[in-house]
Amino acid sequence: MKLINILIVGLLQQTTTTALQLPSSTEITRRTAVSNLIASSTAAVASSSLIYPQSAMADELTVSSNAITLNSQNKKAFPLASFGLQIYNDDTAYKLTLTALEVGYRNFFASVLAGNQKGFARAIKDSGIPRDELYICGSVLSNRVNGEDAAYKKTAQGCLENMQAFSAGNIDKLDMIMLDYPGPNDESVRGQWKAFEEMKTNKLVDDLAVSNFSPAQLDAILVNPSATKPTVNQLPFSVAFHPRDILEYNAKRGVHVQSWSPLSRVLGRYGTDLASIGKNYGKSAAQVGLRWIVQSGASFCSQSKSKSHFEEDLKVFDFELTSEEMKRIAQLAA
């Protein structure tokens, strides 16, 4: 299942502390980005290895069967399975959102990069499902500007554009807003975050989140003890790609990891192994791969154009992999 958005072509260096940066003019899909990240990090993998990620939920995170409470202590739970809209027109977004709602999705990532927030919003309105039963996340792209003031202005503009798009479905407040990428330096990151905190102060959003942030970039925010802590860091994390400490460095800071590439490069390489394990539970290879993510302490944001696949991805909360199976799966990409 593809996750399509404009993404980085940054290279992982020798550790996961390297900043993930978006080049000045390159646009690729998230699936291609994962391929580049994995291919370019062979040396790092050799030295640090892909390991079994111990459950890395921060102290602030309370686990339930299929949802968690984020570090913001938002009373609305954060469902561990999210539908992420991809690049298609508003009509397609409308239809797929209604399908996702029908099968039970209640967490939605409607990125500005997909260009179809209006179609999504109209589907939410027409579904008749009460707004308080849904967790809706928008996003802002403001990583190409340099300096605190410029980053603040660009991000504030992005926040306004989100609210204008979501108003097509009478959505006047978001549950979460996410930075798609960090700015080029600490000052820019802090400018981005200032705009987000202003949006929260204005009661237009409850939770603030980031994507593709390294430890150093998280610390650019957290160096200010009064700053609002990021609740989620959306990262590539899967059976095929789970570098050492990727969960731990986020959990140490009280940040939950959501995978934006849960099955990328997984089924083609390890489908047979995962299917073999899945036979023990009557589950598919995809379901085992997603369950591994959840039991590792993360969540996932996936997408599909098939109702059956939507249903399949949600049915990962009624079984539990053994510790031996978790280790075996983690070692597949070693």
Image (spheres, rainbow, N blue to C red):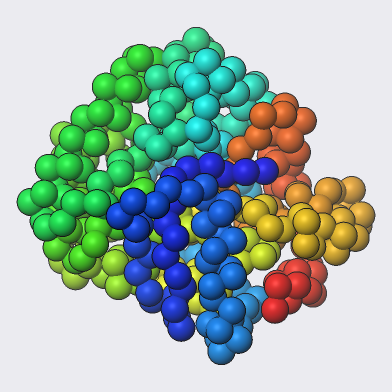
Residue 158 image position (x, y, % from top left): 24, 36
Q: Residue furthest bottom?
A: 47
Q: Residue furthest left?
A: 149
- Closest to the observer, 15 or 32: 32
Q: Is 100 on the left or on the right of 197, as rendered?
A: right
Residue 60 location, quadrant: bottom left
Q: Is 135 on the left or on the right of 300, as rendered?
A: left
Residue 117 image position (x, y, % from top left): 41, 25
Residue 258 image position (x, y, % from top left): 50, 54
The residue positioned 50% from the left and 69% from the top of the image is: 247
Residue 112 location, quadrant: top left
Total numbered badges shown on the rendered structure = 0
The residue positioned 72% from the left and 47% from the top of the image is: 316
Task: Locate the N terminus and report the quarter of the image it occupies.
Answer: top right
Q: Is residue 317 visible?
A: yes
The residue positioned 34% from the left and 58% from the top of the image is: 23
Residue 328 image position (x, y, % from top left): 78, 74
Above or below residue 278? Residue 38 is: below
Task: Locate the C terminus and report the quarter of the image it occupies.
Answer: bottom right
Q: Is residue 64 visible?
A: no
The residue positioned 57% from the left and 44% from the top of the image is: 3
Q: Is 161 on the left or on the right of 273, as rendered?
A: left
Above or below residue 41? Residue 191 is: above
Q: Is 183 on the left or on the right of 47, as rendered?
A: left
Above or below residue 43? Residue 57 is: above
Above or below residue 78? Residue 87 is: above
